[in-house]
Structures are given as structure tokens and as C-alpha cells.
Amino acid sequence: MKTIIRKIFSTILADENKHFYNALFFGTLSAVISQGLNFLTLMLITRKIGESGIGHFSIIQSTVIMLLTFGILGQNVSQAVLISRFKKNNPESLGLLVGNAYLLSLIMMTIIGIFTFLTAEYLFKEIFLDYSIKIFSTGLIILWTTAMTFDMMQISTLIGLQAYRDLIKTDILKGIISIAVIYPLTIKFGLLGTLPGYLLSSFLGLLTNQFFIRKHLRLLNVGIVWRFSVNIIHKILNIGLPIFLASLFIGFATWYTNKIIFNESFGPAALGIVFVCRQIMTLIQFIPVQISKVLLPIISEDTKGKGKSFIMNNSLVFGLSVCLILSVLGLIFENKILLIYKLNPLIASLPYKVILITVVFSSINMILGQFVIAGRNPWIRTFADIVISFILIAGTLLFKAKYIYVALPLAMMISYFSSDILLAIYLRGKKLPERIIDSEAD
């Protein structure tokens, strides 16, 4: 036993693995702070505007998430990988990479903004806070989508730069800003104050992110280069397009299933309960989220490390163990958690339980997906997410008539479980290649 323990610790403390665990520690601390403050903000908002109000907020947020998929074009993954590779192999082109990433998203968001403005009344009626102020609602959604798009890209840039300590600072600042801005506006104006609050908070967050990005680029003697490069755009899209398609299917399925539930009898209340349960799900899986964020740039940079198998296996086991423990605790303290949000335990209990099971399957899916991308097979990850999307929509349509409150949770659970099976079958017996992702950084 002593020999086994000694071997485990020697592997963990090996120079080639310290990088991963150091990044994981600070990344996890950042996630705890971020999710904790977000959890607190949403809890206060839910208590104020109620189940139906938070259900309306949920359909609006899912619309924003679907639209930002087009703006980000998979750069939430490609940016972290490419920044890490360029920083090591081609630092003189790092500024050009950052500049092209911003320009690409700016062009896409301009197109998406025009499209949304022209079609909102027909495709996205649910976003209107009040029909008489639909132009205001549409403009707010476009701006919020833009802010979230650049926020995701900036966070990926900081991860690629491995600025994990500064990510903690940004999460603290953005969390404080969120509570200080969003909750007072919600108290004053209800949902009409919540959304502008999120918009203002998002733009203040962008300034915080950019401050730290510029700081790290200055340390590398790098400036952002605002010049289009076909070669750089090709590299971004080469990794980003499969991720974009996967996110597109997931984003569309989330928005469409929310729309289905929202338009049913008792739908806003049911969607509000599911939204709260999803926030608890997000809180529970912060460890797997951080593992997936840290894992990809680390193994993408380290092409000859001997500890890859150890890191991969233990990241899956550790992430799954944490989710299981937290899910069990969630079941034990179910009534207290639901009452914190002022949800009716008699109605919310079943969807809550199903979501706690789903979080385990979702966490496995998240980490296995990174293994697939790291093995230079991002299109397999895309296919797995397409499976999730189709089952999610089909399940919601199947269950909504009789089980409105639990239709979405059941569909989510079945979809993630099915995707896990597909990824596990694909990965069975496969080894991570010597070179994780081709680093054509020249």
C-alpha cells in the first residue's frame, strides 16, 4: 500500500504533471468563486421575480446563448488551444492571432445583430419584455449577445495564456459587479431591470478581462495586431468549426426545447424550475468544467509528457467522484435547497432529482469530449453533441404532454447518457497520439 501511495504522489509531483495540477487548482478556485457569486445572484433574483419570471428569463438567456454560438465560432475552445501553442512555438504571431480572433467575432456579431433585428418579431417573440417596447428588448438582446461572445473569447484567451491567478481576480470582480448591479435593478424594476443589469455587468466584465489580457501580452512584449491573416483565420476555423457545429446543435436544441415548454400551459413556471435546477447542476459540475478547460491547453502544449494517461484517467475519476458526492449531498438537503429559491418542493422535487442524476452523465460527457478533441477527432465530439440535440428535442416533445415539469430533465438525462455511451465506445482502446493537435504555428 505504501508503495502504491508513494507511486501516486511521485506521479502527481513529477515536473511534467505539476503544470496541470497547478492550473487545475487555480482554475478550480476561480470556478468556485465565479459559480458561487453567480449562484448567489440567481438565487436572489429567483426569490424576487418567482418561477414564471425566472422562466421568462430562461427563454431569453437561451436565445442569447444560441445566437452567441454564431459569434464565437468555436473560439471558446480554439482560442485556448492556439494561444497556448503560439505562446510556446510562435510568440511573434501571438498578437496577430488575438487580433484576428476579435475581428472574426466582430464580423459575425454584426451579421447576427442585423439578422436578429430583422427577424425577432417572427422567430424570437419570447424575448419581448413588453410588446410596446420590442425594439428596446431586441437591442438589449443583441448587445448582451455581443458582450457574452467577447467575454467567452477573452476567458479562453486568458486560459491559453495560463493566467489562472488573474482569472480568479476577474471572477471576483465580475461577481461583485453582478450582485451590485443586477440585484438592485431587479428589486426596482423586476425582470425589466434584470436584463439591463446583466448587460451592464457583462460590459464591465469585458473591460476587466481586457485589462488582464493586455497585462499578459505586455509581459510577453506582444501587442494586438489588427490585420486580417488568411492563415490565422484558417487555423482558428480548423479547430473551431467542429466545436461551432456542436455548440450550434446544442444551443438550438436548448433554445427550442425551452420555447416548447414556455408556450405550454404552466410552461413558464415549469421552465423556471428547470432553470433553477440547471443552475444547481452548473454549480455541482464546476470541477469537471475546470478539468475540461485546463486539460485541453495543457495536453496540447505538452507533446511528449509521460503522464498524459495518468492525468486523463484521474481527471475523469476525480471529476466524476466530486459530482457523485455533491449530487448525494444535493439529495440529502433537497428541501432546504429548493426553499432557498422559494420553489414548491412538491412540484420541484422530481425535476430536481432527475437533474442531479443528469449532472453525472453531463460531467462524464464534458471530459470525454475533451479527450476526443485532444485525440485530433473534434468531429466525433460534434457527432456526439448532435445526438444530444436530437434526443433532447425528441424527448421534450414526447414527454411534454403528460409530464410538463419533468419533460426537459428527462430528455436531458437520456440524451447525455446516450452521448456518453457513444464517446466511450469510440475511445475504447484508443491511445492519445504523440502529437495532440498539430501545431502548425509557423
Image (tube, helix red, strand yellow):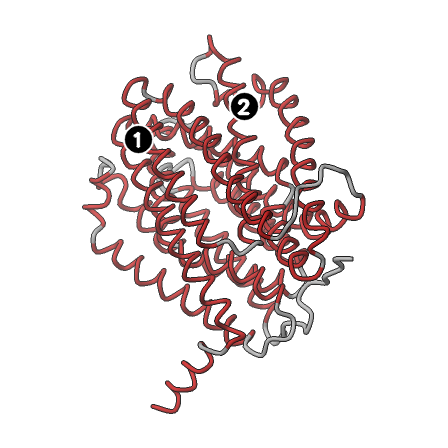
Mark 1, Cα crowd under 10 Å, few <14 / some 14-19 / many 20+, is many
Q: Mark 1 points at which residue?
A: 45
Closer to the camera in the image, 8 or 69:
8
Q: Which residue is found at the position 63% from the left and 60% from the top?
A: 373
Closer to the camera in the image, 105 or 26:
26
Q: Could you say whether the residue bearing mark 2 is in a helix, strand or loop?
A: loop
Coordinates of residue 133 in the picture (x, y in percent): 47, 10
Q: Nearer the viewer, mark 1 or mark 2?
A: 1
Closer to the camera in the image, 171 or 318:
171
What whole-number distance in Å separates the C-alpha atoms at marks 1 and 2?
A: 23 Å
Where's the N terminus, which quadrant?
bottom left
Question: Relative to 338, is 169 on the left or the right?
Answer: right
Coordinates of residue 403 in the picture (x, y in percent): 37, 40
Coordinates of residue 40 in the picture (x, y in percent): 29, 40
Q: Could you say whether the residue bearing mark 1 is in a helix, strand or loop?
A: helix
Where's the C terminus, which quadrant?
bottom right
Q: Which residue is found at the position 65% from the left and 42% from the top?
A: 73
Mark 2, Cα crowd under 10 Å, few <14 / some 14-19 / many 20+, is some
Q: Which of marks 1 and 2 is nearer the N terminus?
A: 1
Q: Name the residue under label 2.
A: 124
- What number of labels is visible? 2
Q: In which quarter of the image is residue 306?
A: bottom right
Q: What residue type is labelled 1?
A: Ile
Label ID, residue 19: none
Q: Which amino acid does label 2 sit on?
A: Phe
Coordinates of residue 233 in the picture (x, y in percent): 75, 45
Q: Which residue is found at the position 55% from the left and 49% from the top?
A: 216
Question: Relative to 417, is 271 on the left or the right?
Answer: left
| Residue farthest along the top direction in this orientation | 132
- The answer to whether residue 135 is above or below residue 374 is above
